[in-house]
Image (tube, rainbow, N blue to C red):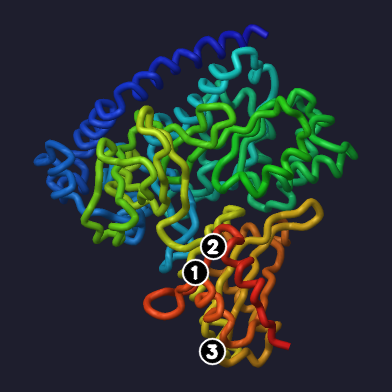
Amino acid sequence: MPFNSIFSWLIKKRIHQIDLFKKYPIEVQNEVFNKLISSAMYTEFGFQNDFFRIKNQKTFQELVPLSDYNITKKYVDRLMAGDQNILWPSDTKWFAKSSGTTADRSKFIPVTKESLEECHYKGGKDLLALYYSNYPGCKLYNGKHLIVGGSAQINPLTADSYFGDLSAIIVNNLPWWAEIRRTPSKEIALMGEWEEKIEKMAQSTIKENVLILAGVPSWTMVLADRVLEITGKKNLKEVWPNLELFMHGGVSFEPYRDHFSRLIPDPNMHYVETYNASEGFFGIQDQPHVNELLLMLDYGIYYEFIPMQEFNGIDSKVVLPLSNVELGVNYAVVISTNGGLWRYILGDTIKFTSLVPYRFKITGRTKSFINTFGEELIVENAEHAIAFACEKTNATIKDYTAGPIYREEEQNGGHEWVIEFSQPPEDRERFEFLVDEKLREINSDYDAKRYKDMILAKPTFHFTEVGTFDSWLKNKGKLGGQNKIPRLSNNREILEQILNILEPIK
């Protein structure tokens, strides 16, 4: 088809620019830095932090403090109320809804025209450019691209701004070259009620010639299972014989890899990981079959890094530019962006696997967490829910840990908790119910995944005798001192070790 050939030719022109920032990464980052500072010089934030005096990275660090969402929120609240020229000069009318902090159920990350076009959309184009470069014979634009996105709500604070999942903001504003190949319809793609949405997505796409799937693995799996139920087919290649690419991100793909190999039993099926968060598009898996991400350096994002051994939140003293990072060191990521985030601690940690060019792996979060299914459960959420359940059931907790239950072929994923009480709850079932309900109340991403057990099943709890966790610490040679039980883990390693010595309450 001519359109595929034209698109392939146009999009590959971007490869030359990617090669340039791979060859001259520091020079490109310096250009991004200078453009960010000059663009925001006349904003309220620019005046407050003396952007006129910023000449280089050193003065930038001296004049602009590290920030996180709790600090940025006061500006975001005003932007959502309609004020402008606060963090970025162009109007900010879109807000990406993300999982919340200790104080708020959800975060609302500002998305500007520049960050949408020069970062998020550019990342999508670059993914396709790299894919066409790696697989020259592909014909992705001969068929449809099925995007499993989120929902968008109208922000009631102003008439012309709205918030929703980042994927919904992207779908709602797609450029023409992407919109003409996207499926399902925008009306279905932006639906908020997930059970009805999955059903309509499945029904409306089973007759399409789908070549690309894009989305978070957990929701994509739910859609795939429903498609197979409706069609009676054994796998997705029987439904979409030309399917060749799944673009995924948001959570680790490893727990889902075996399931997808059964859903799509084709050695020529390709999987490409992206690192695209509400705050920006940061990385793309640019090499086939190599589990590393290329750091994208010309997206209007200036990077800094805090070695995790030096990490102390916004009070961290050691903050490095890209030129000073080393291989194998765990870093917290700090970003300044064309979306109006300034020296913002992202909350993710990475390790560089290559410095020529800069490639990396995502290693986790700056805080203990579970994010196997996109639920972004953090320790603050867990502590809040446990304390609430203890209060309501007259229990006193001693220690606990939790980790994921990976999805099996006939079973949804979930969370598994091991809890040691100094005083057990009066009503065990009520305690378990309250923990789950409180987590749903305070964490919108957890709540979305628990909706009708579509992604996360009801959590599993083990109540154990006093001394179980001390036994585990003793076995690890860590009993006493400052050693603590890891509260949340994004894998089952610690959970399995504790379960092996578990002495359950009879």
C-alpha gap between disc 1 and disc 3: 19 Å
Name the residue tied to disc 1: 486
Q: Is residue 9 left or right of residue 3?
A: left
- Count up the numbered dots: 3
Name the residue tied to disc 3: 396
Can you say whether 13 is above or below 276 in the image? above
Q: Quadrant of residue 316?
A: bottom left
The answer to whether residue 390 of the structure is visible from this angle is: yes
Name the residue tied to disc 2: 489
Can you say whether 306 is above or below 295 in the image? below
Q: Is residue 503 left or right of residue 295?
A: right
Residue at 67% in and 34% down: 185
Q: Amino acid at mark 1?
A: Pro
**Other residues around mark 1 within 10 Å, as few (<14) / some (14–19) / many (≥20):** some
C-alpha gap between disc 1 and disc 2: 7 Å
- Mark 1 touching mark 2, by CB under 8 A? yes
Q: Position of residue 445 (x, y in %)?
A: 56, 58
Q: Quadrant of residue 370?
A: bottom right
Secondary structure of the residue carrying tag 3 is strand
